Image (cartoon, rainbow, N blue to C red):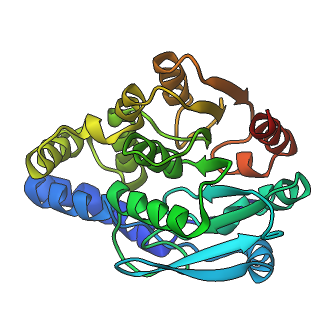
């Protein structure tokens, strides 16, 4: 029998949110906005702690203290890894030894409001600023490997001028309505809240929610070697999102896996090998 690893806070939100929608759409949208930008912090598994202990730690000087990690020979060219929403850099624990064997060092970080880093809320703007800080400290990586939200953050930063020429996006969301729906599904919310949330974002930031997604970013990017890796059975981020992005950017390549889902895809030997081959070539 599989253990239910759902955090108690998320269970409580799932119980509360439908009731809040029934009481007041305005209150529901305000609360949805809050949780949309507030990642949950999950307990770090023991196997990730082992990898964490082998890292060289460094601090990234930003508005808040951001935890950075480095693995491997400091004289080697480096690959930057970017975790997903509510994730941690050590989720790449299967990737990192193979990348080091392949002749690289690996740099990672816990994003704002994630892992060992400070903060409670975060967004694409924050991730872009931190990515610029890392490149200022460590130089330009030979490639970036990103998971889930990290892929969108990477594309946004590249659109804004970050000098990345090779990117691997694994299980990354791309389509505005699908992103909102995935959050609503996680908390038992309805599209009525989603539609109102999108209107709120437009009013608050002066542009539609669609312009904060990878489908918009990719239209502004012309010279990027891009590999998408996505599982056909991903229940968190549907593969239709990767398929839509590759249609918008046909110079990229899509690898489809089966039976790995959203997170186990980061542990698959064939996926890791394919990503390393892409980086080398």
Residue 175 seen in render: yes
> Can you give x and y, in whole percent of width and height, for residue 229 in the image?
67, 34
The residue lying toward the viewer, choosing from 210 and 195, is: 210
* Picture layout, residue 7 above or below residue 21: below
Residue 99 location, quadrant: bottom right
Residue 3 seen in render: no
Q: Is residue 250 left or right of residue 63?
A: right
The residue lying toward the viewer, choosing from 177 and 70, is: 70
Q: For the point 65% across and 29% down, which residue is it?
A: 232
> Can you give x and y, in whole percent of width and height, for residue 50 in the image?
81, 78
Residue 26 location, quadrant: bottom left
Q: Quadrant of the N terminus?
A: bottom right
Q: For the point 63% across and 45% down, which residue is it?
A: 262
Q: For the point 24% across and 43% down, which residue is it?
A: 194
* Picture layout, residue 214 above or below residue 6: above
Q: For the point 70% across and 27% down, which residue is it?
A: 256
> Can you give x and y, in whole percent of width and height, for residue 169 in the image?
60, 41
> Can you give x and y, in whole percent of width and height, for residue 147 in the image?
59, 49
The residue lying toward the viewer, choosing from 228 and 221, is: 221
């Amino acid at each position: 029998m599989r253990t239910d690893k759902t955090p108690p806070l998320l269970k409580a939100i799932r119980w509360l949110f439908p009731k809040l929608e029934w009481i007041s759409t305005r209150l529901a949208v305000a609360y949805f906005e809050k949780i949309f930008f507030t990642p949950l912090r999950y307990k770090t598994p023991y196997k990730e702690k082992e990898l964490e202990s082998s890292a060289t730690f460094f601090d990234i000087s930003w508005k808040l203290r951001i935890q950075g990690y480095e693995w491997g020979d400091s004289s080697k060219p480096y690959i930057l890894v970017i975790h997903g929403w509510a994730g941690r850099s050590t989720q790449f624990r299967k990737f990192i030894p193979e990348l080091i064997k392949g002749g690289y060092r690996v740099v990672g970080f816990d994003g704002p409001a994630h892992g060992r880093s400070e903060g409670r809320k975060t967004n694409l703007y924050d991730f872009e600023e931190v990515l610029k800080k890392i490149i200022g400290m460590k130089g330009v990586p030979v490639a970036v490997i990103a998971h889930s939200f990290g892929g969108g953050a990477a594309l946004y930063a590249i659109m804004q001028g970050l000098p990345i020429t090779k990117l691997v996006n694994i299980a990354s969301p791309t389509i505005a309505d699908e992103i909102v729906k995935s959050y609503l599904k996680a908390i038992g919310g309805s599209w009525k809240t989603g539609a109102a949330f999108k209107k709120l974002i437009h009013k608050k930031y002066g542009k539609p929610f669609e312009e904060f997604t990878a489908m918009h970013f990719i239209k502004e990017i012309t010279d990027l070697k891009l590999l998408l890796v996505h599982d056909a059975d991903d229940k968190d981020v549907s593969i239709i999102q990767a398929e839509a992005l590759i249609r918008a950017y046909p110079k990229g390549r899509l690898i489809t896996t089966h039976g790995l889902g959203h997170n186990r895809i980061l542990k698959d030997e064939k996926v890791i090998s394919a990503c390393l081959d892409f980086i080398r070539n």
